[in-house]
Amino acid sequence: MAILELKSIANHFATIRFWKDLSARGRDRRDPGDFRPSETGRTVLLRLIAGVEQPSDGLLAIDGFDMSGIPPNERNIGMAFQNFALFPISRPMEYCQFREGAGDARLRSMIAFTRRQASQDRPRVSHAPRELSNGQKQRTALARALAASPSSFYR
Amino acid sequence: MRGYFEDISPDIEHAYRIAGNGWWKTFRKIAIRWPVRHRCSRPAGLYLRLEQLCFALILASADKAAGDVARSPSSPLQAFKYGQDRRGNRAFDHPDIGLGLYAQRYLVEGLSLGA
């Protein structure tokens, strides 16, 4: 279980300061974005948490550790993007092998999950993303994010 | 070349980074799909094209507009469309060109993803 803390977090894209003193526990199953309506920076917040953007002010901590300056590949989080962010050439099976050294048991279970979900009557794990339906793309993106056994997961 | 990179969704690279990969591996695996067999090949060409990398670094430090750092007469880079060839684009068979593209993508101001 990961504990996410946001204290007076702000981003230079926003004209006003937002997401003040927000904290969420992993087991709450509550998306921090639920606190705000759309177009108020929910996606920006997720990108700040993921580390692909840096906050201009405030503190972002995961499990008590300040994440400022920590690159995305060292935060041990999972994230599913709105547009799925599937590489147009790779197959769904490859997405589940993104992170080297991922937990084998979990990786196998997620690959099985992807195979089971992405193939209704014929195997689609070897298909390109453009050949998958929207739901299959979404499941593939989820499987990719979960295959790395992240401490917290955001979508 | 700018058009090729603009075809790549930043989210794809960010997703790969979040999955635990650094900038270089993200570039090699996602942006150009550099074939593994060419990873350490042609050291002479790599050395010769290091000047392009240095040129890109100079451009980045001087806050000037980016040029075609990796332009090569044998590489029709302008014709490439991202994600259309599963085996990787043949223009990226050369590690020296890869270095130049890496500089363009992440070091030269104007094409950077904010790294």
Image (cartoon, grey):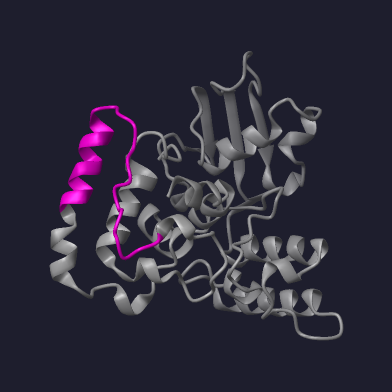
Q: Which residues are magenta?
A: B51-76
Q: Is residue A139 above or below residue B105?
A: below
Horizontal side, residue A8 vs residue A57: left or right: right
Q: Is residue A151 above or below residue A53?
A: below
Horizontal side, residue B38 vs residue A48: left or right: left
Residue A75 point in image, percent of width and height: 49, 49
Q: Residue at x 59, y 62 (%)?
A: A87
Horizontal side, residue A116 vs residue B21: left or right: right
Q: Could you tell me if residue B21 is visible in this image?
A: no
Q: Is residue B67 shown in magenta?
A: yes
Horizontal side, residue B83 vs residue B69: left or right: right
Q: Is residue A67 shown in magenta?
A: no
Residue with the most extreme top position: A16
Snapshot quadrant of residue B110: top left
Residue B75 point in image, percent of width and height: 35, 63
Q: Nearer the viewer, residue A15 or A69?
A: A15
Q: Residue at x 70, y 33 (%)?
A: A42
Q: Could you tell me if residue A47 is visible in this image?
A: yes
Q: Residue at x 58, y 58 (%)?
A: A150
Q: Residue at x 49, y 76 (%)?
A: B87
Q: Is residue B77 above or below residue A98?
A: above
Q: Nearer the viewer, residue A15 or B71?
A: B71
Residue B100 point in image, percent of width and height: 29, 53
Residue with the most extreme right position: A121
